[in-house]
C-alpha cells in the first residue's frame, strides 16, 4: 500500500507530505490521523522548531474524500463527532506550522491550510470552497476562518459561487503570506522554516500563542496577554543571551531555555 503521509526531518524542521496521488490527496480520517501523529512526534522532539505541511507539485489537497462520507447520515456524523475528532490536530500544535501549497487547495484542503500558521503559495496555487456544489457547506472551518483571513465579501463569494482564488489574489486578500515560483516552493519554505527554528523555541511558541490570542479576545485583553508573555521572556536564558549578543555585536546562541 502507498504510504499516505510521508515525513522527514530536515535540520530543525519537520516535513509532512500528503501522498495520495491517485485521489488528488483527498483527506480522510486515516490521512488526518497520520498527520496528527507526525505533528505529535515533531512537537515532542526538542530539536524541531518548525513544521512544514505540503502535498505534491500539482495538488495540496483537493478536499475531503467524498467517497468516504457520501453515505453518512446525521446521527453517524453527530455521534462519531466527524471532523472534530482528529481533523483539527494542526490547530493544537504549539510549534509553528507552515503550509506549502502548489496547485489545488480545495474544500477541506483549503480549510486545513487555514489551520496552519502561514501559507506559502506557489504561483500555481488555487484556493476554493466548492462544497455548495455538493449540496453542503464547509465543515472544517471554511465559513469561520476564511472571513477572518480574507473578509466577509470574498468569503461569501468563494463559498456561494464555488469560484477558485489564485495565488496573487489570495496574497492580496491576506490568505497567503508569500508567493514563490513553483519550482522553488519547498526549498524557499524550508529555508524560512529553518530561519524560524534557529530562534529560541520558547519565544517562538510565545509569539504564536500571542498572535493567535488576537483572534480570540478584545484588543485590551490581547495587549494584557502580550505584555505578560513579554515580561515572562525575561526569565529565559535565551533572552539574556539574545540581548547580550546584540550589545556585543555577535550572533546569539540560543539553547531553548
Image (tube, rainbow, N blue to C red):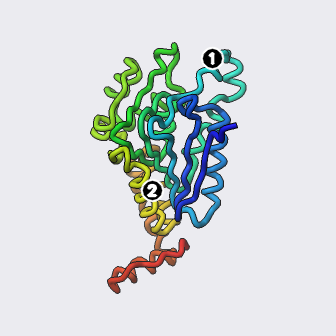
Please indicate whether residue 247 sits to the left or right of residue 197 in the image.
left
Q: Quadrant of residue 149?
A: top left
In the picture of the structure, the residue carrying the numbered disc 2 is 190
x then y, percent, for residue 105: 45, 33
Q: Residue at x 65, y 23 (%)?
A: 68
- Quadrant of the snapshot with the C terminus: bottom right
Instruction: Find the distance from the CA under tag 1 to the CA under tag 2.
Output: 37 Å
Circle 1 packing at 10 Å, graded few (<14), some (14-19), many (20+), is: few
Please indicate whether residue 218 sits to the left or right of residue 169 in the image.
right
Q: Residue at x 50, y 20 (%)?
A: 137
Q: Is residue 195 visible?
A: yes
- Quadrant of the snapshot with the N terminus: top right
The earlier-in-sequence mark between 1 and 2 is 1
x then y, percent, for residue 144: 46, 32
Number of numbered tags placed on the structure image: 2
Q: Secondary structure at mark 2?
A: helix
Q: Residue at x 47, y 35 (%)?
A: 59
Measured along the vertical axis of the image, is residue 52 above or below residue 147? below
Between circles 1 and 2, the one closer to the viewer is: 2
Please indicate whether residue 191 sits to the left or right of residue 36 in the image.
left
Q: Residue at x 58, y 39 (%)?
A: 19
Q: Secondary structure at mark 1?
A: loop
In the picture of the structure, the residue carrying the numbered disc 1 is 70
x then y, percent, for residue 155: 37, 27
Question: Residue extending furthest top?
Answer: 135
Amino acid at each position: 500500500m502507498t504510504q499516505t503521509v510521508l515525513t522527514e526531518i530536515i535540520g530543525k524542521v519537520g516535513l509532512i507530505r500528503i501522498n495520495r496521488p491517485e485521489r488528488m490527496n483527498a483527506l480522510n480520517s486515516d490521512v488526518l490521523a497520520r498527520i496528527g501523529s507526525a505533528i505529535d512526534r515533531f512537537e515532542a522532539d526538542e530539536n524541531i522548531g518548525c513544521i512544514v505541511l505540503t502535498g505534491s507539485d500539482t495538488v495540496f489537497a483537493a478536499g475531503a474524500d467524498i467517497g468516504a462520507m457520501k453515505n453518512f447520515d446525521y446521527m453517524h456524523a453527530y455521534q462519531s463527532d466527524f471532523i472534530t475528532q482528529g481533523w483539527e490536530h494542526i490547530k493544537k500544535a504549539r510549534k509553528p506550522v507552515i503550509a506549502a501549497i502548489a496547485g489545488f487547495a480545495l474544500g477541506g484542503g483549503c480549510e486545513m491550510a487555514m489551520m496552519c500558521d502561514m501559507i506559502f503559495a506557489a504561483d500555481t496555487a488555487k484556493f476554493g470552497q466548492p462544497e455548495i456544489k455538493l449540496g453542503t457547506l464547509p465543515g472544517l472551518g471554511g465559513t469561520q476562518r476564511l472571513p477572518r483571513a480574507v473578509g466577509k465579501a470574498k468569503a461569501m463569494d468563494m463559498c456561494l459561487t464555488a469560484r477558485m482564488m489564485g495565488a496573487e489574489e489570495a496574497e492580496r486578500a491576506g490568505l497567503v503570506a508569500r508567493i514563490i515560483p513553483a519550482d522553488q516552493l519547498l526549498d524557499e519554505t524550508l529555508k524560512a522554516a529553518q530561519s524560524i527554528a534557529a530562534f529560541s523555541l520558547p519565544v517562538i511558541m510565545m509569539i504564536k500563542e500571542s498572535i493567535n490570542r488576537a483572534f480570540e479576545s478584545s484588543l485590551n485583553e490581547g495587549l494584557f496577554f502580550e505584555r505578560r508573555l513579554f515580561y515572562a521572556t525575561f526569565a529565559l536564558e535565551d533572552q539574556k543571551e539574545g540581548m547580550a549578543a546584540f550589545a556585543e555585536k555577535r550572533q546569539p546562541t540560543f539553547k531553548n531555555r
